[in-house]
Image (cartoon, rainbow, N blue to C red):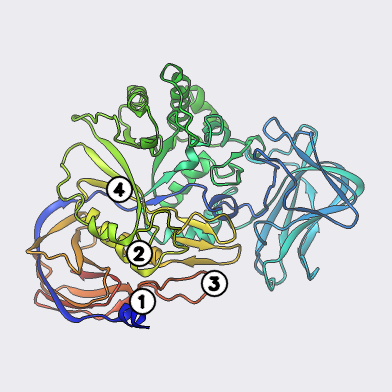
C-alpha cells in the first residue's frame, strides 16, 4: 500500500525559469520528423495494405490452405496448378463452395463498396457473399462476372485461369467482425487462385493501396519522410529470402511474395510502386532501404561475390529514376508509371553492426551508386568499420530501444556531436522496457512515462537538428490479433484503430516543427526538458516541454524574440498522473492532446506542467 501511495505523490510549486531569445542556435532539418515502416506485427498484410483476405494466393515457405473452410460437403485441396510462374499453387474445390474469414475477422460498413476478385478455371455461375460465420446472416451478395477488361495490376486471364469480379455493397453494418467472404458455384469442380477482397474506397482511391482509416491516422502525424521497406524485413532470414524489389512490382499475380522475417508470409501487394505512391499521397520524402549483402540468420555475401547484389540495387534505382531509353525505366513505364519516382536518400542495409564485413560492403555499394547517381545521399546502417568521407554528405542511421531512464539520460547526447557532413538519422527508436532487468519482456503498449521519456530524447534531437537530420519511431503498426513485437505506436483490428500515448506525443511534436532552433539563456534541465523553435513560414514560435517525472512544475520563461512580445499564446498537451497508465486498445482513451491554459503578457510566459507531461506552447504573431 505504501508503494502505491508513493507512486502517485508529486511535488507542487517547483519553478523553472529560462529566457528564450531569437539568437539562432541552428537551422532545423526540413525532414526532422517522419515515419518508419516494415511489415511487422501484421502492420502490412492484415493491416495497412488494403487486402482483407488472409492467404489469398497460397504464398510463403509453408504453402497451405490456412484460413479457408469448405462449404457443405465440399473438399478443398492444394494443387500444383500454377496461376503464373510466381504463384505455383492453387486451391481445387470439389463441391459447391468455400469461405475465407480474413485476418481475424472481416469488417465492412453499410453502403460501403467492396471489390471481390478471383482467378478460376472450371465451374460456372459464381456467386460471392459477405455473411456472418455463426449467424449465417447475409449482408451482401451478387454474381461474379468474368472480367472483359483488365488493368496493369489485374490481367483478365493467365495460364487458363479467368478473372472474375464482383462488387459488393452491404445493406447494414454487421454486429461484429465474425464474418467471411463466401464463394459458391455450379459444376462441382473448380480451381481457384488469388482470391481477394478489397475496399472500394482505399486511401486516395488507389486501385491497390492502403486501408483508409489507418492511412488517415498516419497522415494526421504530418511526417516529412517514410523509411521503407525495413528494417529487418528488408534483410530476409537468408540471402535467398531477402526483399527483392523486382518481385514486388507489376501485376499482382506475378508477385511471388516471400516468407517475411516476422513469422508470416508477405504477399508483396504492398510493393515498390505502392510505397512510392504512399509517399506521394502523404507528401513524404522516400528513404529507400536496399539490400546490402547481410541477412538476419548471419549469412553474408563474400566480397568477391558481391557484384550481382550491387547490380540488383543499380537496377532498382534505374527502375525508379530511368527514362524510356533505359532497360528498367522502360519496365516501370510498362507497369503503368511514366514519370520517374522521387529518390534522394538510399540506405545501404539495415543494422549492419550485427554483420562482420560492412567495412567492405558499404564502400562498394556507395561507390557504385554515387558513380551513376552522384546526387543521391547515402545512408550508412552502421558506423562499424566505416570511414565517413569528410567532403560529402552522408547519413548515419542509429537505432535505440531502451527504458525511460536511458532516454532521459541521453537528452544531451548530441550536444557535443561534431557539426560536419556526417548527419545522424535516428531511424528507429522506442521505449520498450520499464526496468533494467536483463531479458525483460517488452511492455505491451506505450505507457505515459515511456512516452514522456521518448519526448525528452526527441527534444534533445530537435535542438540539435543541424546534426540530427531525421528521426522515426518503430514499430509503427500492430494488428492486436497478430504476432507481437511491441510496443507499437498504433494498434488496430479489422474494425477499429487505437492511438497510443506515444502516437499523441509524436503528433504534437511533429505538427509543431520549425525551421530555426532558438537560443536558450541559462537553461536548467531537470525535472523539465525543453526547446524552442521558430516556424518562419507561419510566424509561430513553439516552446516544447517534456516532464518525465511525478513533479508538478510551473514553467516560466521570458520571450526575447523580436515581434513576439505581444503574440497570441495557446497551449496543447498530453499528460497522466499515473506513469503506467496507457491507452489500451478497445478501452476508452486515458489521454489525448487537449488545450491548456497559458499565461502570456509582454514577453512573460507561465504554464502549469503536470506530471508525465508533453506540451507545446505556440506564440502566433
Q: Residue at x 85, y 53 (%)?
A: 97
Q: Residue at x 30, y 48 (%)?
A: 470
Q: Are marks 1 and 3 in contact (CB under 8 Å)?
A: no
Q: Which residue is mark 3?
A: 586
**SS at circle 4:** strand
Q: Residues within 10 Å of mark 4 (few under 14, many from 20)?
A: many
Image coords of residue 90 (percent x, y): 77, 39
Q: Is residue 603 visible?
A: yes
Image coords of residue 614 (percent x, y): 29, 69
Label 1 – label 4 distance at C-alpha: 31 Å
Q: Which residue is mark 1?
A: 578
Q: Residue at x 38, y 39 (%)?
A: 351
The disc placed on residue 450 is 2
**SS at circle 1:** loop
Image quarter of residue 132: bottom right
Q: Which residue is mark 4?
A: 470
Q: Is residue 5 left or right of residue 161?
A: left
Q: Mark 2 or mark 3, which is nearer to you?
A: 2
Label 2 – label 4 distance at C-alpha: 21 Å
**SS at circle 2:** helix
Q: Is residue 427 left or right of residue 536?
A: right
- Dot placed on the residue nearer the N-terminal end, 1 or 2: 2
Label 4 – label 3 distance at C-alpha: 32 Å
- Dot placed on the residue nearer the N-terminal end, 4 or 3: 4
Label 1 – label 2 distance at C-alpha: 12 Å
> Where does the C terminus fall, quadrant-wise?
bottom left
Q: Mark 1 or mark 3, which is nearer to you?
A: 1
- Dot placed on the residue nearer the N-terminal end, 1 or 3: 1
Amino acid at each position: 500500500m505504501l508503494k502505491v501511495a508513493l507512486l502517485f505523490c508529486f511535488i507542487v510549486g517547483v519553478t523553472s525559469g529560462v529566457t528564450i531569445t531569437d539568437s539562432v542556435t541552428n537551422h532545423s532539418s526540413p525532414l526532422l520528423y517522419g515515419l518508419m515502416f516494415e511489415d511487422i506485427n501484421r502492420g502490412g498484410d492484415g493491416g495497412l495494405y488494403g487486402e482483407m483476405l488472409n492467404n489469398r494466393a497460397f504464398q510463403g515457405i509453408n504453402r497451405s490452405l490456412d484460413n479457408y473452410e469448405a462449404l457443405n460437403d465440399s473438399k478443398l485441396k492444394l494443387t500444383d496448378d500454377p496461376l503464373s510462374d510466381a504463384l505455383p499453387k492453387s486451391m481445387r474445390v470439389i463441391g459447391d463452395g468455400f469461405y475465407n474469414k480474413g485476418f481475424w475477422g472481416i469488417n465492412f460498413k453499410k453502403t460501403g463498396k467492396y471489390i471481390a476478385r478471383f482467378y478460376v478455371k472450371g465451374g460456372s455461375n459464381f456467386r460471392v457473399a459477405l455473411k456472418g460465420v455463426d449467424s449465417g446472416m447475409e449482408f451482401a451478395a451478387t454474381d461474379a462476372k468474368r472480367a472483359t477488361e483488365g488493368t496493369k495490376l489485374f490481367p483478365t486471364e493467365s495460364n487458363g485461369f479467368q478473372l472474375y469480379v464482383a462488387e459488393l455493397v452491404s445493406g447494414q453494418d454487421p454486429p461484429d467482425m465474425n464474418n467471411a467472404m463466401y464463394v459458391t458455384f455450379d459444376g462441382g469442380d473448380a480451381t481457384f487462385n488469388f482470391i481477394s477482397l478489397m475496399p472500394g474506397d482505399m486511401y486516395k482511391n488507389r486501385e491497390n493501396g492502403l486501408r483508409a482509416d489507418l492511412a488517415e491516422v498516419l497522415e494526421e502525424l504530418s511526417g516529412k519522410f517514410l523509411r521503407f521497406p525495413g528494417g529487418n524485413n528488408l534483410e530476409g532470414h537468408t540471402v535467398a529470402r531477402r526483399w527483392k524489389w523486382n518481385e514486388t512490382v507489376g501485376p499482382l499475380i506475378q508477385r511471388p511474395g516471400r516468407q517475411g522475417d516476422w513469422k508470416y508470409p508477405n504477399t508483396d501487394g504492398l510493393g515498390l510502386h505502392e510505397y512510392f505512391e504512399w509517399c506521394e499521397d502523404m507528401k513524404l520524402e522516400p528513404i529507400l532501404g536496399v539490400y546490402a549483402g547481410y541477412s538476419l540468420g548471419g549469412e553474408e555475401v563474400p566480397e568477391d561475390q558481391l557484384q550481382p547484389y550491387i547490380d540488383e540495387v543499380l537496377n532498382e534505382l534505374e527502375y525508379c529514376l530511368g527514362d524510356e531509353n533505359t532497360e528498367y525505366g522502360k519496365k516501370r513505364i510498362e507497369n503503368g508509371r511514366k514519370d520517374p519516382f522521387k529518390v534522394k536518400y538510399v540506405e545501404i542495409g539495415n543494422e549492419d553492426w550485427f554483420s562482420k564485413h560492412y567495412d567492405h560492403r558499404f564502400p562498394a555499394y556507395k561507390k557504385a551508386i554515387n558513380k551513376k547517381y552522384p546526387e543521391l545521399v547515402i545512408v550508412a546502417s552502421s558506423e562499424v568499420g566505416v570511414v565517413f568521407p569528410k567532403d560529402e554528405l552522408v547519413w548515419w542511421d542509429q537505432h535505440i530501444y531502451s527504458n525511460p531512464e536511458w532516454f532521459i539520460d541521453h537528452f544531451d547526447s548530441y550536444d557535443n556531436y561534431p557539426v560536419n557532413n556526417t548527419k545522424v538519422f535516428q531511424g528507429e527508436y522506442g521505449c520498450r522496457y520499464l526496468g533494467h532487468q536483463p531479458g525483460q519482456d517488452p511492455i505491451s503498449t506505450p505507457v505515459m512515462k515511456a512516452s514522456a521519456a521518448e519526448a525528452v530524447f526527441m527534444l534533445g534531437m530537435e535542438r540539435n537538428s543541424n546534426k540530427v537530420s531525421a528521426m522515426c519511431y518503430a514499430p509503427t503498426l500492430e494488428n492486436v490479433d497478430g504476432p507481437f513485437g511491441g510496443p507499437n505506436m498504433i494498434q488496430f483490428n479489422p474494425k477499429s484503430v487505437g492511438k497510443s500515448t506515444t502516437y499523441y506525443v509524436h503528433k504534437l511534436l511533429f505538427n509543431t516543427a520549425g525551421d530555426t532552433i532558438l537560443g536558450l539563456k541559462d537553461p536548467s534541465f531537470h525535472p523539465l526538458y525543453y526547446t524552442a523553435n521558430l516556424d518562419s513560414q507561419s510566424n509561430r514560435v513553439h516552446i516544447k516541454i517534456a516532464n518525465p517525472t511525478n513533479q508538478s512544475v510551473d514553467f516560466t520563461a521570458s520571450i526575447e524574440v523580436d515581434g513576439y512580445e505581444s503574440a497570441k499564446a495557446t497551449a496543447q498537451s498530453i499528460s497522466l498522473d499515473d506513469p503506467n497508465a496507457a491507452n489500451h486498445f478497445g478501452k476508452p482513451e486515458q489521454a489525448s492532446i487537449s488545450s491548456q491554459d497559458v499565461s502570456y503578457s509582454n514577453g512573460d510566459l507561465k504554464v502549469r506542467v503536470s506530471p508525465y507531461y508533453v506540451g507545446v506552447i505556440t506564440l502566433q504573431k
